[in-house]
Every structure is written in C-alpha cells, then in structure tokens.
Amino acid sequence: MEPYLAHLASDGREQPLLDHLEGTARRAAQFAAAFDAEEQGRLAGLAHDLGKYSHLFQQRLRGGPRVDHATAGAFVCLQQGQPFAAFAIAGHHSGLPDGGSQGDAPTTGSFLGRINRALQGKLPSFSPWTQELTLPSPPLPNLSALDGMFFTRMLYSCLVDADYTDTADFMAESSSPTAPVPTIEALWERLRNYIAGWFPPKGPLNTQRCAILDHCIQEGLQRDPGLFTLTVPTGGGKTVASLAFALAQAQSKGLRRVIYVIPYTSIIEQTAQTFRDILGEEAVLEHHSGVSYDLQDEATPEALPLAQATETWDLPVVVTTAVQFFESLFSARPASCRKLHNLARSVIVFDEAQMLPVSYLRPCVWAMAQLVAHYHVSAVLCTATQPALQPLFQEFAPQLTPVELCPPDTCRWEVFQRVTFQNAGKLTWDALACRLQAQPQVLCVVNTRAGAQAVFQRLQREDSFHLSTLMYPAHRRRQLAEIRRRLTLGLPCRVVSTSLIEAGVDVDFPAVYREEAGLDSLLQAAGRCNREGHRPAQESVVTLFQGEGNAPPLFAPAIGAGRYVMARHTDLASPEAIHDYFRELLDLKGTQAQDIQNILPTMADNRFPFRTVAERFHLIEDHTVTVYIPQDEGAALVERLQAGECSRALFRKLGQYGVSIYPQHAAALTASGDLAPWGEGVFLLQNLDAYDSKTGLSLQADCGKGLFL
C-alpha cells in the first residue's frame, strides 16, 4: 500500500504524512516548551493533519477538489478532552474560529458547527490514522475562560509556526545560507563595550544618567522575571538604560530575546538605529509598515534572517509598534499569530507607556499581565510620565507588584529640571506667529494638522519648518535632518509641528510653545527644550497657551485632567503630579471607556469568541485611506504599482511615501482632480501641486476632522 502523503513538491518529491506530523509535532513541542506546554504542543502537531488520511485528500494532492482536513484532528482532540489543541487545529489554516453553540449547523464556520459536521458523519473517513499514530494525552492546565483563550492562542502560534516551517523546509528545493545570528550573551558584551566610555561620568547630568544605567543593570542581573517600571526624566538616557536592563536580565535569567514596543514609527526608526549602532545590523529586527526586507531585491545571507523574522520574531532584538504587538495578541489569523509563541521567555519593553490608548487600556493591560504571570516574560513600562496602571495589573494578576528600576534614591529629578513653565493664556494664530517670529530658534506644538498649517503659513518661510503626518515619512525625515543641522550650527530655525515631534524625537530647542493638552503631552513637549541641559533652566521657557477655537472633543478629558493637576501641583514634572494626572484621567474616562468594544466581557461570557474579538480589536480606530505621493523614490514605486506589481515588499516601501487622510478629505481632493483611486482605500496623487514641499498634502478640501499626530 502506498504511504499517505502530506505534500507534493514542484519537483515531484513526496513528503509522507507521518513524517510531516512528527516533524510538526517536534517543532511545536519545542516552541511550547517555552511556556511549559511541551506535550500540548506535541499533541497539536501530531493531530493537526489527521484529515489528510482520507482518500479524498490524497486525491486533492493530485488536483482533486478542496477537502476540509483540519476539522478531523480537532474532532479527535475534543473527543479526548483536549479543547485547547482542538481549537488550535481547527484554525491552523483558516484562522481561529468563534466557539459558537452546540446547536450550530454543520455549515457554519464556528468551532462547534464544524464539530457537528464530524458528529453527523459529514467528514471524509480518515480512520487509517489509528494504524500509524498514537496521540498523547497531556494533563490539561486549570485555566479560566480568559486564561484559556490566551493559552489557546499561544498554542495555536506554536502549531502554525511549526506547520509552516516543516512544510517550507520540505518544499524548498535548496536551502539558502544565512548569516549567523549573535547570541544574547554576545549582545550583552557589545552593550558593555558601548557603555564603557560613559564611565567615569563628567558633569551632574551624565552622573545621573550613569547612576540610572548602573542601577538598571544591577536590577537586571539580580531580579527574577516580572513586572517593572522605568520612570526616567526626559534626557535621563532611558533608551540605553532600558536596553541594558533587558540584556542583563535576558543573559542572567535565560530569556531568549528583547522586544521593544513603541507607539509610533517616528520613534521606532530612531530607536532601531540606536540599537543597530550598539548591537549590530544583524541582531535587530525593525518590524512595522514602513520598513521592507525584500528578498527579490537583496537575496543576501544578511537579509534572509530579517525577512523571515518579520513572520516569526525569532531574532534576539525586535523593535515594533504597539499596533503590531497588541493586534497580533488579539488576532485570529495564522500569519499574525505565528510569532506569538516567541514572546514567551522574553523581556518586553513598552516604551512611552503613557501612550497606550485609553479606549483599549483594559484588554492591553490584561494581555501584558497574562504574559508576565504565565509566560515567563519580564515587562518594563518605560516612560518619563508613568501612567497609574498598578490597580489594573492588581485586578488581572494580584500576584504582580511592579518594581521601579529608577527609584527616588537613584535619580535626583531636580538635576533634570531644565525648563521653566509659563502660561500665556489664549493666543490667536496671528499673535502666536508674532511671538515665534521674534525668536531665532523655537518649537511650537499644536493639536491638529490644520492648526499646524495655519500657524506655519503666518511665518516667514525662510528658516521656518513644518512637521505633520500630512507629510510622507521620508519627507519628514529629511525635514528633521535639516532641523537638527540648523540647531547644531546655531542657525535660525522655527518649527511648527503636531505632537508627532514629542514622541521620542531627539531635538533640542532653547524655547518651546505648547498648545493646551494633557499633562503627559506638555511634559513630552518640554523634553524638546534644553534637552542636553546646556542652558540655565530659567532661560529655557516652555510657554503653554490656548489656541484659536475650542479644543477638539477628543482632547477634552486629557485637558481637563491636566488642568486639575496644574491647579494642585507647582512642579508639573514631579512623579506625584504625573501619578495624579493619570489617576484623574482614568477616573474621568471610567472603566467602560477603557474597553470600548467590551473585549474582556465578551471573552469571559462566550465560548472562545476568537473571530469576534479579532474583528473588534483595532488599536487605531480612525477609518482612513492612504494617498501615495510620487516624489523622489516614491515616483518609481508608484510606477511599479501602476504597472501591475502587487507585493507586500512594494507596499512596505510605498509606506515611506504614503499619507493617511479621512475619506471625506480624499473625496474632496478626488473631485477636484488631485487624486485618482487605486484599489480599496488607496489613492495616487495626480496633481503634484497639491503636495507642498514645506507642509505636505493640501488641506484645502479637508473636513476639519484631522486630529492626526
């Protein structure tokens, strides 16, 4: 009798089904061992393709009709009392399904509907599996509904990665050489060599930075994995200090990688480059929509691990966005979930933790608590303005008590007090522009893109600069490079920006103006003033003001909480003021507003609603479209798109030349002939005059909703 097959390669090679099941099981068990679920992983791997033991599937390999081969293994596992493996197997191709109800029809896509399909004998017979396999019966972990959903998704990740990897290894006609990836121990030594030049420190500011760095290293070496906060004043060197803690912890406690989660790509690019400078290009994966590892363009041994790691995150240092990180944790899709098992036994640093969106705060903190409590993760909330999240962590995991990596006796905050605040009250755009024009070097941060353009247009264009997301990312990078050059040389430089410049962008102005906003935003703006402490604090003034018109409703709670704290604290940058601000902000928002899609109640009250949760969880709620700008390299990329090319690598590169706008804005620009539609949610700029070299895409047809950063 011919053996049952799993795959046929294009060159005619055959992979026996038993070989594929055992290879997948071996890998899945290895992956799941990172969170103490080795035997669950082995079971899922052995059972995932039991449906391929049917004669109909064997015909499918040679051109026959499609066959449901995933439900069979899920049915067998459920019969054996293994629901976690059953769910993982059911979704290993089509995605994790909703659990559904026992009365679901066999034609529904729910898990129980598919189980009813098996119960009613509507699956092709796959009984020969019993002649080749004996499935293990690992003990079930005792988990609540919420914990069980998270565990299932992690087990699913192990299965998907193991299945994809085993299949890809068989299908590959030849293996490509890859460059060796450095170990955590090697990276620890590279970091130590990098910081060796910091000691002994010179001056009070560097003395404090080195004290923070040294304390983080000692805590990393000595502490067991857990929940940590790193509250460092702006300019305190938190990027390197947090990396030092993470590598010290990883190499001393046997953790496998460091994952940096950052709110915006504008910070990611800067942070990732810093890490590459310290650790080497081959050690750092920068994973977000604006970066591409295109093997067609650069099929080199150095590029291959980076390209493959975007799916698996199996490099030692990963820098990614909060959107990518959290939406993957709540996804039901195989490609998005494949990397999740590599979060186990990692150090995860949440940079600028205060920027976690309040409307999804509860599910985000719950996911973080799951990782720390059950998956051997060290999580670090890293910021100059620490949000008051301890009550939420205590609710979800009472055993977790955060440890501060920069306690008061380590850091003298007064050393970092480099600015003086003053309040100018309400200013018209004309009055504000007059004040800015009178200063040779000044930064002004406003709340909306329309406001930024309005103020900028009132300045003399020479020596003045504008920054907002109406400019494509590559354009903003060029502008920032010129701004930094002029600041360094002492040349006139007046900048009007939306809050994107507050998010970790390394610039140093002698004076800053900030439109009224939340306290965290005010302090972030202040961090761009006298950043290096070269000027006296009394000469480095941060001016707070109210702009024209009413504040957008989106900002009202943050502004209200900021006013509350400013009326009660003279030192706005003190840890006490910051704690009171976030406590007041969360109180104003209320519990329901911290989970606007009812993610956690839905998971607790339903039978594993994976698909429903994935459809509801979108960290960025704005319904926007993308306009690609055919300028510079973007022109050639747009030509490739128009010629019919459609690849992920192309769209990643195009991301550097894309601007996100509201549909109403796009409709108005299209009606005026400035834009041409190109697929769903995508437009191409037709009229290059609608893109200004200083301010970016025209706002003339804007509908007034542009609250982008």
Image (cartoon, rainbow, N blue to C red):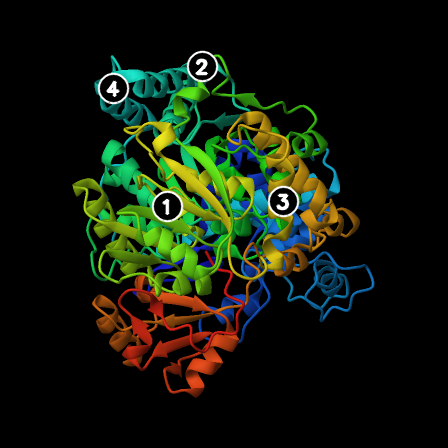
Mark earlier in primary sequence (3, 4): 4
Question: Looking at the picture, which amino acid does disc 2 mark?
Answer: Thr
Label 2 secondary element: loop
Mark earlier in primary sequence (3, 1): 1
Looking at the picture, tell me which residue is in the foreground, 600 or 522.
522
Looking at the picture, tell me which residue is in the foreground, 313 or 618.
618
Quadrant of the image occupied by residue 16: bottom left
Q: Which mark is residue 410?
A: 2
Residue at the image position 44 percent from the left and 20 percent from the top: 414
Disc 1 marks which residue? Answer: 268
Mark earlier in primary sequence (2, 4): 4
- Residue 124 drawn at (x, y percent): 64, 67
Question: Looking at the picture, which amino acid does disc 1 mark?
Answer: Ile
Distance, label 3 to label 1, CA atoms, is 21 Å
Residue at the image position 23 percent from the left and 21 percent from the top: 193
Question: Looking at the picture, which amino acid does disc 4 mark?
Answer: Trp
Quadrant of the image occupied by residue 257: top left
Q: Which mark is residue 198?
A: 4
Disc 3 marks which residue? Answer: 361
Looking at the picture, tell me which residue is in the foreground, 406 or 439.
439
**Pointer 2: residues within 10 angstroms few (<14), some, or many (20+)?**
some
- Residue 658 drawn at (x, y percent): 36, 66
- Residue 433 drawn at (x, y percent): 37, 57
Mark earlier in primary sequence (2, 1): 1
Residue at the image position 43 percent from the left and 32 percent from the top: 420
